[in-house]
Amino acid sequence: MRTSFKQDITDQDDFKRKLLLWSQQFREVTFMDSNNYQQEYSNYDWILAVDAFTSIKTDYFNAFEDLKQYQQSSKDCLFGYLSYDLKNDTEELQSNNFDGLGFPDLFFYQPKKLFLAKGSQLEIRYLHFCDDELEDDWKEILSMGSDFETKSSKVNIQQRISAKSYLEKANKMLDYIHRGDLYEANFCMEFYAENAQIEPLEVFLKLNEISKPPFAVFFKNHKQYLLSASPERYLKKEGDTIISQPIKGTAKRFSDPKEDEKSKNELANNAKERAENIMIIRNFDRFASR
């Protein structure tokens, strides 16, 4: 289904920047970068997937079954996202919050062109019907400049909920917790800007340079973008093994055995951290049982 090519890269940072600039011509783009973190469960240092051959876009109703059928029919690498409101497909729940973005609840696509890097080795995988484009693409990528037109302007960021309303809602959740109706709550508030003019790639590159996280993502679907600088991995599945690397419920490791043992015991005896670990394990049990 795909033709594979291999190339050596001498300057990783320069090549990644050129590749990202080149990728902006496509409607669909996914770039994932580990920022040179040495990870036990990492297959590649970074990945770029561009230009959808096929795709699936749907709301939450029957979303997981639709995605399963799409994956079985494509039998290929898929890139996309699962939104929070997919909870409505697994539980008797509903969401009535204001949505000013209009992202589909679920979106995945099968890219025509894939770039996968490990060390200085770059593997390029093109679908068979477009593999004759590789030579021209490669020349175009190498000829890309390192700069781009800046479109970003001053952004006026606002909060969706007032400070008074936020505190009222937080206190209401505390009442639910004290009554036993809730075990733990993750109360998020949206910050937004209207009529903002930004260059998404420019913002991503600046964000990534500041934070250098092990799980950075630039995602583009036509005019919708996701820019992420995450320090944690939620789930990865390898065969029958599920791997998670959260930052909640964790403690720092030490090279000194005594300090390491002390850190472990403090984690084990911390009521808040134990509660979060129990919550995560319960979620894994539900995930694995499906």
Image (cartoon, rainbow, N blue to C red):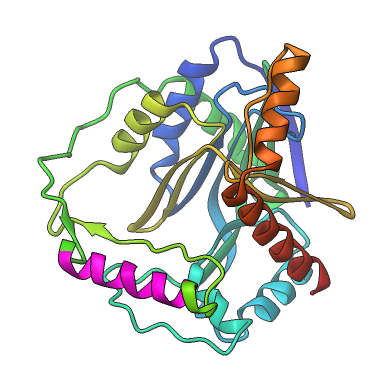
| Of 267 and 166, the residue lying toward us | 267
Q: Looking at the rendering, which quadrant does residue 263 occupy?
A: top right
In which image quadrant can residue 11 be found?
top right
Is 262 displayed left or right of 12 in the figure?
Answer: right
Tell me where the magenta segment starts and ends, as one range: 164-177
- Closer to the camera in the image, 47 or 179: 179
Q: Residue 75: x, y in percent?
A: 78, 62
Q: Nearer the viewer, residue 206 or 20?
A: 206
Q: Which residue is at a point 28% across and 77% down the rendered structure image?
A: 98
For residue 36: magenta?
no
The residue sitting at 76% across, 41% down in the picture is 3
Does residue 238 appear to the left or right of 155 in the view shown?
Answer: right
Q: Position of residue 21 (x, y in %)?
A: 39, 32
Give the answer, above or below, for where 22 lies relative to 239: above
Is 205 situated above or below 160?
above
Q: Is residue 14 above or below residue 263?
A: above
Say which residue appears at 53% left-offset and 37% top-offset.
231
Residue reaching furthest bottom?
A: 92
> Furthest residue to the right?
240
Q: Quadrant of residue 25?
A: top left
Compared to residue 93, the image places residue 77 above or below, namely above
Taking the magenta stretch, the answer to whether it contains residue 169 is yes
